[in-house]
Image: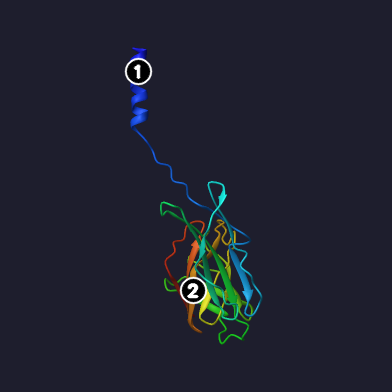
Amino acid sequence: MALLVLSSCDTESTADVSKVTNYAVIELNGSDEVIINQGDTWTDPSVNVTLSGESYPFTTSTVVDTNVPGVYYITYEAVNDLGFAASATRTVVVISTAPSIYNLEGSWARSNGSPGTCTQISDRYYTYDNAGGVTGANQATVTFINVNDDEIYIPFQENTSPSGISIKSFLPGHIDDNDNFRWQLQASAYYGTFERTFSRQ
């Protein structure tokens, strides 16, 4: 009986052959989020990429022009010999040094009616005390940047709400005019990434 069981197990193990695919491992050098002023000197710190413990080639998708304000996403990608890709992304925000044409300070409300207050810190930096347009323990206060009088960006911030939610921009938000703006949040809990719109009250 014992001999029969061992023979059966051995037959199954040789018949069930699995293929192992090794993906590249990509490690960012430096921060995954960089905020600089227009015209500043910046050099991409790049990444370390390995496959099975050995250095491995990669490509990058975007070149940052520090003379042109905007939100840049640099994607680093490495594809193994079977065609499977691994990637990592760094966000670089280049802030305009020109005086803004907008002043967003004041009383606002999300399209669902939930009110909030925008407070100006400096020409292009603000805080907003209801980033998700909700009330209660998940009401979040964030600092955001008017990048170039079109795009707005929320840098990563921890504990923005009484419930402890961390938030950053999912994609760049936009200023439509002095009385309307919109953004999408990437949050550690509660919020989805759909667009939220706000109007001056």
Task: Pinpoint residue 51: horizontal percent, then vertical percent.
Answer: 52, 50
Secondary structure at numbered mark 1? helix
Residue 128 seen in the figure? no
Where is mark 2, residue-wise?
Answer: 173
Using the image as rendered, state which of residue 34 and residue 83 is in the foreground. Answer: 83
Task: Pinpoint residue 90: horizontal percent, then vertical percent.
Answer: 55, 64
The kind of residue tagged 1 is Val
For image coordinates 62% across by 79% down, the residue present is: 38
Using the image as rendered, state which of residue 34 and residue 153 is in the foreground. Answer: 34
The kind of residue tagged 2 is Gly
Residue 184, numbered label: none
Label 1 – label 2 distance at C-alpha = 64 Å
Q: Earlier in the sequence, mark 1 or mark 2?
A: 1
Q: Which circle, 1 or 2, is nearer the viewer?
A: 1
From what the image shows, is residue 56 above or below residue 14? below
Where is mark 1, residue-wise?
Answer: 5
From what the image shows, is residue 71 above or below residue 15? below
Task: Pinpoint residue 169: horizontal percent, then vertical percent.
Answer: 52, 67
Using the image as rendered, state which of residue 95 and residue 77 is in the foreground. Answer: 77
